[in-house]
Structure formats: C-alpha cells, structure tokens
Image (cartoon, rainbow, N blue to C red):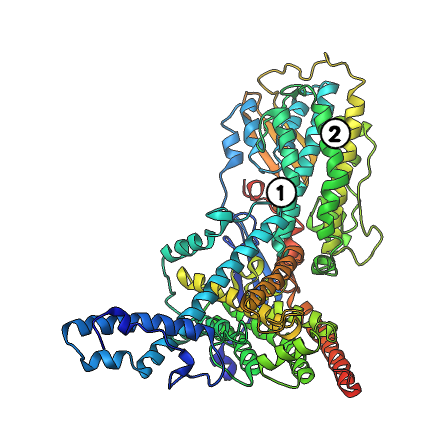
Amino acid sequence: MVEERMNTDKMWITMGPQHPFSHGLWTLRVHADGEIITDAEPEIGYLHRGWEKECENRTYAKIIPMADRLCYSASMTWSHVFCKVAEEALDIEVPERAQYLRVIADEICRIQSHLMWLAAVGTDLGNLTVFLWALREREFFLDLNIRLCGQRLTTNYPRIGGVRNDMPYYFERDCMRCVERFETVGLPEIMKLATDSSPFVGRMQGIKYLTAKDVANWGVTGPAMRGCGVDYDVRRDDPYDAYGEIDFEVPVLNKNNPKGGDAYDRFLVRLEEMYQSCEIIRQAFQKLQSIPKEAPSRVKVPRCIPAGTHMAKIEDPRGESIMYLVSDGTEKPWRLKVRSPIFVNVSSSKHMVDGVRIADVPAIMAMIDMCLGETDR
Amino acid sequence: MGLSILDWIVFKNPMANEYYPFGDMYNLPYEIGYKLSEIILGFVAWFLNLFVHDNLWSQWLVSDVVMNVLAIILLVVVIFGVGFIVNLTMIWEERKILGRLMDRRGTQIGPLGYFQCLGDGLKTFMKENIAPKAIDKKIYWWGLALVIGTSVLLACMVPLSGRWFIADYKVGLLILFGMFALAPFLILCAGWAQNNKFSLIGGMRAAELMISYEVPMLIILATSCLLAGAYGINDLVQFQNDHLWFVIPEIIGFFTFFVCAIAESERVPFDLSEAEAELVEGWQTEYAGMKWGLIMLADYFRGYVACAFIVLLFLGGWAMPFAGTDTWYAEIWFLFKVCAVFAAFVWARGAFPRVRTDQIINIGWRVLMPLSILNLVVVVAIKLMGWM
C-alpha cells in the first residue's frame, strides 16, 4: 500500500541527448534501482543525415570529402577506407610512396583521435586538467595535419589511387619532432594526472569486467575489444597499404584472463596504442627514405568503377571500419554500406552498463569513445 | 544646537553609546557603521533644523537609540559587503589558479581578469527565470532561499578578527558548524522538490555524503575545542597564539579536516551532488537563471567558510607569530590565510577526478573516521601529559 502510494518502482533515467556525458547527440536510457543500473537501452538517430543515400548521388571522387565528415576526429581513416574500397573495385596498386604517406597520415589521425578521447575521459571523470592538457597535445598533431593537407580536421587527403599531394618540405623533421616530444614529454605529463593518480585509476579499476567471449559475440572491435583479451588488429592480421612492412606491437591486455578486462584495461590499451603509433610513424619515415622523392604518390584512375561488389576494412581509431560497395559500372556507386565500429559498440552498451552505478556510466561509455557522426550516418 | 552642520555631525566614541551592543568588546565594523550613521543622521537632522529650529525630530535622530539601530544595520551591510568582495576575490582566485594549472589564461575581463565574475553574474541575471510546472513549489523556493540564506549568513558570522564580528557568542564554533551542516539537508529537500530524476539523485547523494564525512569533521572540531578548552572562536585563536598553532599537535586532524571541508563545501573531488558528467547539474538542474547564479555564489560562500574553519581551527586564525592577535592588519592576515587554504582547495580540484559515491563512503568511514579518532587520542595524550 505504502509502496503503491509512494511509487518506489525503479525509474528510467534518460541520459541524453543533451546530457554532458553523451559526447554527441544520443541517448542512453538507463533503468535505475537507486543508483544501480538494471537495464539500459541506447537510442540513436538524432544525427541521421542519410549519408549512404547521399553517396549514391555523387561521383566517387566527391565521396572522399564526405567520408571525412563521418567522424570529425577520424577523418583520415574514413576517407582512407573509402579510397581503399574503390581501389579494390578498380583492382589497382597504390604507389609505394603513397602507401607510406597514408600510413603516416592514419597514425597521426589515430594519435589525435585518441587524444580527443583522453580529453573526453577527463571531463567524464570530472578532471578538467586532463581535458585541457590532452587538447593542448592534440593541437601539435592537428598542426601536422595542416602542414600535410591544409586542414585540421576534415583532411580530404587520400585519393583513389594514392594521396592528394606528397608531403611538404621538412614535414619529416616537423613530424618527428612532434612525435618525440609527445612520447617523452607530452603524454607522460598527462599520465601523471591519469595513470599515476590513484583516484583517477580508482574510478575505472574493477568497473565492469567484460570477457573476451562476450565482447567478440557483441561485435565490439577496436581498443575496447583488445582490452578485454581479443587479440585482433586489422593492421597486423590483414595488413593493408604499407602496414605489412612495419614492425609494431598490438597492445592486448588480459589475453588469457577468463575474467576479461575492466574499464581501466580498455583505458590502458588506447594509451599504449598512442606509443605504438609513434613507433609506426618513425618506421614509416625510415622506409620512406629508400623511395625516391620523384616517385609518384598517385596514379590516374578511371572515372567509372566496373560492376561488382567489393569490401574494404581498415583499423579505425575506434575499431574496425568496413565499407561495402555495390557498383553498377557507372560513375556513381549503386550502394555504399558503412560498417561503423561505434554503431556496433554502442549497441552492446546495454550489457556494458548492466549492474554498475550511475556514476560509472561515463567511465564505461568513455572507453568506447563515442562518435555520433559515423554511428548515425 | 546651531545652524552649522558641524554642530550636528559630531564623531563620538561608539562604545560610549548607551545601547552599545557588544559590552566592553571593541567592534570595528560597528564603528564604521556608527561613523556612517553619524554622518547620515547628522546631515538629515541638520537639514530639518534649517526649517524648524530646535525641533524634536532632529534631536531624536541624533539620539543614542537611532544611532545604534542604524549602526547595527550598517554593521551588517559592511560585514556582508566585505564578505561579498572576499567571495568575488575567491572566485577570481580559483579561476586564475585553475587556468594556470590547466595551461590556459583563465579570466580576462578587467585588471587581471578580476571583473569577469561580475560579467558572468550579469549574464546569469539576463537568463530566463524558469521554474518547472510540476515542482513542489513551497519546498522548491524555500529550499533555494534557505541554501543561499544559510550560506550567506554563515559567511557573515565568521569573525575576521577580535574586532570584526557580527555578534559575540561564547559557543561560536558550534553555531557555525551547526549552520554549516544544515545545507545537505536543505539540498536533499530542494532536490526532492524539483520533480527531476537527476535532482533527486543529486539530493540523495548529498545526504549520502553528509553521513560519511560530517562525523569525522565534528570529532575533529570537538578535539580542537578540547585542546583549547573553549568553544569560543576568540578563545581558540588566543589559545593558539599563546601556545602553538593546532596544525602541529593535530597534524592528522588537519589533513582529515581538509578532506572533510572539501566534501562539506561540495567542491570537485567530492561534488557528487552536482556531478555534471553523470547528473547534468545534480540538485541544481531545475534552478534556472539567476537562481543558479545565486546558488553558485552561495557555494563559494560555503567554500570561504570551509577555509575559514581550517584557518581558525588549525592555522591560528588571525594570530600573527611574534605579533599577537591585536595587530592592525589582523583581518587582512586572516583573509590572506583563507585565500591560501582556498588555493589548496583549487589545487585539489585541478589534480583529482570526482570520486564515486561508494568510494567517498569508504573514505569517510574507513579512513577519515579512524584518523579523526586517532587525532582525538593524540590530543587527549597531550592534555594528559600536560604539554599544552
């Protein structure tokens, strides 16, 4: 009787679309018993722009800048995956120089994307210093983007059959300075506030263990998956462009741990990935020196793509991004399907936040690094 | 009396006033208020006297009763004004230090960015003042008024020195602490009344917080009183001046109290009731416009009181080493100490992320509580050995 009057039921709390924790327009409706979450459902669709349909009305060359806009902080990889699927369809080989340039551009993009993520983790956990320091470091990499392709975020750099331009003079020097500074000064400084700070770590440690099996079944990819023990990275296991010739490690935590990984493991994987990206950039520049500067960085490609279906996948900063192209032989795609890593990751958020506290939701959801542009398309 | 204005504006010793409210204690803001009321009332009385010579109204205006009443009102205005300026300075201090910590510039308007918070206040004032339909109106407005009211009153009740106080009470610390501890309850009510899930959870968290750190805080407060053998703030400061600042014998208590004070003033490592990443703005979610601005201001008043508590209990209040408690700069010295403690608060805000509810209860009961009892044991030992 009392319960009836007082309505002591559990309540649905709508976190979003304008909630500070949801980076972008999406909603996580959580069913809370006090502070404990018993159920959750993500809702997306606020940012749907009909991206795939729009592509059907554009020539292949015009899709490249659109692919940039799929995710503002991973523009390089998204235009890369589009160019790659077109190259698969045309069955052309990208010049070696362009392959290395793409690798370098991708890794710069990965670092700046991960720094954006680190900044977001800072605000989610309530520490604005981490936010501003990470953005400060990110600025150096955005400056590299400007040097390379004239834009900070929507870079429009890869082309079908190569890259838009070769690297400018002194780019290697600038890039290596920036990377070395980042490795030795920039990231360790931020880590003093993050991994070295027990309250910061305490917010993530022991929060929501996810087993490798679960994660694989949900289709989660990227650092979130590797932190839980699934050893898979497209760059290493299905190398594209010049990744096959570069020697790097794929950070994987809890590989044989039946318990899986917690939010902190997923946090650490992204940090280590940034160091590995620096290593990849370094090696790519070394390999580039053996290729003459006069070598082409782009090949001419026909305007129309022969009919057929093609698929390309690359390792996005957030996971495995796939584009599936159905071509009817004209200059426009008949259908272009995007497999966005975040779309899949966020659909498993129901399981990810099950049984945790409301205070843990930002910490957990931060680890999949939401980007709504690619999720809603 | 004559026609000259100087016959009417006569500066007398305020303590010679028949109704002087502070007994034999000298009160500086009262004297400022008294001087001001002598000028104001003297001028009015002189002006009336120009028209009707030797009228009773003029005589009454410069009498002891009216002087005293106006002086007391002006005393409150002076104390609040100084508190308000201190508050603005602390907001500015926080934003500047935080800017430095975060590698940005901080506030920019005015000299060294000092006027930024005035601009922000104006901006919040311009915002639409929305109150949702389904609120519990009475509690919504009373909760707001009381949260702000108690905070401002509290800030005014803190004495800045032996001569700068609003009233002389022998159990000053207890009254201060009682008022200070009222806010979480009011926040709970205000959070409940807003008919918003985020505010409700924020209010509940305030209550959750309250039970976890207020007990150690009170224990340490009692320990300090035990050490000084008095509840009065003046006595406490005098004792620290005569013997030793309590930060040395009570070093454990100092750090414990520091943590508790951050929690009590709901600042960043412990601002669970308004954790913006989880709860939008916590219990303040439905307070729009200037209501929120006033809450923010009240937050800083409470931050000021928390710092003042630390200074009074551990850092010797306004006592200056080798100069005693009766220096001419006692108020400035006290406020300087408060700002220094507040800088440490800001430092904590810049360095730490927000802790979780279960973590703060863990900290409260498993760390702060034993530490505060340990502190009590140390102080009892000191007392028993007769060292202080």
Q: Is residue A186 above or below residue B177?
A: above
Quadrant where the image shows the N terminus of chain B:
bottom left
Q: Residues within 10 Å of mark 1 (few under 14, many from 20)?
A: some
Q: Is residue A110 visible?
A: yes
Residue projecting furthest to the top? A294
User: Residue B341 is drawn in which quadrant?
Assistant: bottom right
Q: CA distance from mark 2 to mark 1?
A: 19 Å
Percent coordinates x, y for residue B139 in the rendering: 42, 75
Residue projecting furthest to the left? B51
Residue indicated by mark 1 = A135
Which of the two residues, A285 or A128, is positioned nearer the viewer here?
A128
Q: Is residue B101 above or below residue B259?
A: above
Which of the two residues, B348 or A204, is positioned nearer the viewer here?
B348
- Left or right: where does residue B87 sit relative to residue A36? left
Percent coordinates x, y for residue A347 in the rendering: 62, 51
Host chain of mark 2: A
Residue projecting furthest to the right? A256
Percent coordinates x, y for residue B3 in the rendering: 20, 71
- Left or right: where does residue B69 sit relative to residue A2? left
Q: Amino acid at mark 1?
A: Leu
Which of the two residues, A278 or B322, is positioned nearer the viewer here?
B322
Percent coordinates x, y for residue B331 in the rendering: 54, 68
User: Residue B274 is drawn in which quadrant?
Assistant: bottom right
Which of the two residues, B337 or B10, is positioned nearer the viewer here?
B10
Q: Is residue A172 above or below residue A368?
A: above
Q: Amino acid at mark 2?
A: Met
Residue indicated by mark 2 = A176
Host chain of mark 1: A
Quadrant where the image shows the C terminus of chain B:
bottom right
